[in-house]
Image: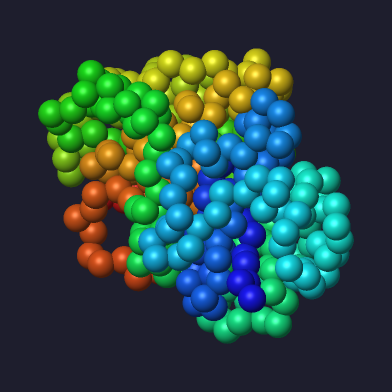
Amino acid sequence: MTRYVVSLRPTGLGDRLICLVGAWIFARNTGRTLIVDWRGSLYSREQRENIFSLCFANTDDLAGVPLIVADDADAHSLPRPVFPDHWDRDDLPAEPWRGPKEDSFDLRDQQIAVIRSGADIAAPTVVLNTCINDGVSSFADAHRCLEALKPVPAIAAAVEDFYRDELAGRPVIGLHIRHGNGGNILAHGRYWRSFGQGIDRCRQAVMTARARIGAEAPVFLCTDSLKVEIAIRKVIPNVVTRAKAFRPPGRGELQYGPAAHAGLEDALAEMLLLARCNVLIRYPPASFFSFLAAVLKPSAMPDVEAVETLAQPFDPKDPLSCAVLF
């Protein structure tokens, strides 16, 4: 009997990618088939649309692991029982967006332990739907999985066009700033107790990067807040951005807006462009949005073994400073 691990996590794109890497690791270690079920997404026009197919090419294999991009038929045919047991029902695998939010720390820790152990469990179907970022510890594993994802032609072309027209031919600093724009960003909120200090931390990080690669190096800025973009342009010269629609100030994160489906290409294109920058600045350092770029960017750093290294603050005197990846 074929055994499966299903990657869900109906949140932002960065969180989905981390869950996908965790599911890929578990599938590889246990000889399972990986199912990517990105239906019910905030970026979907309708709930049954699997946005993985709007982002990446569908193949039968992802870096050596058998891959299925789920549709309704796939979901109905999953063998039982299912782990966790609250997914062991006829209706939830077919309509996963109706499932629980799964914000329990106990469940999260249990699934992280399953991934990191390398061992299998009895259930033929395993559903991963929690925030399992701590389950992805190996840089090599994350790199192998993410490198195998191939963006669909429209997004690949948009990335190439922007890079050629705005960034090519010179060292570039990628700066990702997650602000939240009034949304609940949980542990990231402490980085914005003072808006001015947050902006200044980013300015200092850019100065550090320019001291290494050149004072005229352009800064490719990606953020979820127009307020942040305006503030950064006031203190940092030569900032480049990709045009996109922001939500009104204080109205929350981009992926929660009524027109979020229109921002899917923008989100993935920015992730991929950040991954092509010579230096990557992450603020807050552990923002999931910049995870793909941190793993895939070209790097002159010593060999990285642990993913957590990619989120270390660059200023040892300031635990809230940016991560700066050369």
Judge whether 273 appears above or below 283 on screen.
above
Task: Please tell me which residue lies in front, 37 or 240.
Answer: 37
Horizontal and vertical percent position of residue 242: 39, 20
Judge whether 164 appears above or below 287 on screen.
above
Residue plotted at (61% across, 82% down): 120
* Quadrant (top left/top right/bottom left/bottom right) for the N terminus: bottom right
Residue plotted at (23% across, 65% down): 302
Task: Please tell me which residue lies in front, 34 or 209.
Answer: 34
Residue plotted at (50% across, 69% down): 25
Judge whether 35 appears above or below 211 on screen.
below
Q: Is residue 246 shown left or right of residue 279?
A: right
Q: How is the image coloured?
A: rainbow
Horizontal and vertical percent position of residue 90: 85, 57
Horizontal and vertical percent position of residue 283: 47, 42
Q: Quadrant of residue 61?
A: bottom left
**Is any atom of residue 102 visible in this view?**
yes
Q: Quadrant of residue 254?
A: top right
Task: Please tell me which residue lies in front, 112 or 34.
Answer: 34
Q: Is residue 72 shown left or right of residue 302?
A: right
The image shows a total of numbered marks equal to 0
**Is any atom of residue 321 visible in this view?**
no
Judge whether 157 appears above or below 128 on screen.
above
Q: Quadrant of residue 215?
A: top left
Q: Is residue 277 shown left or right of residue 176?
A: left
Residue plotted at (57% across, 34% down): 179
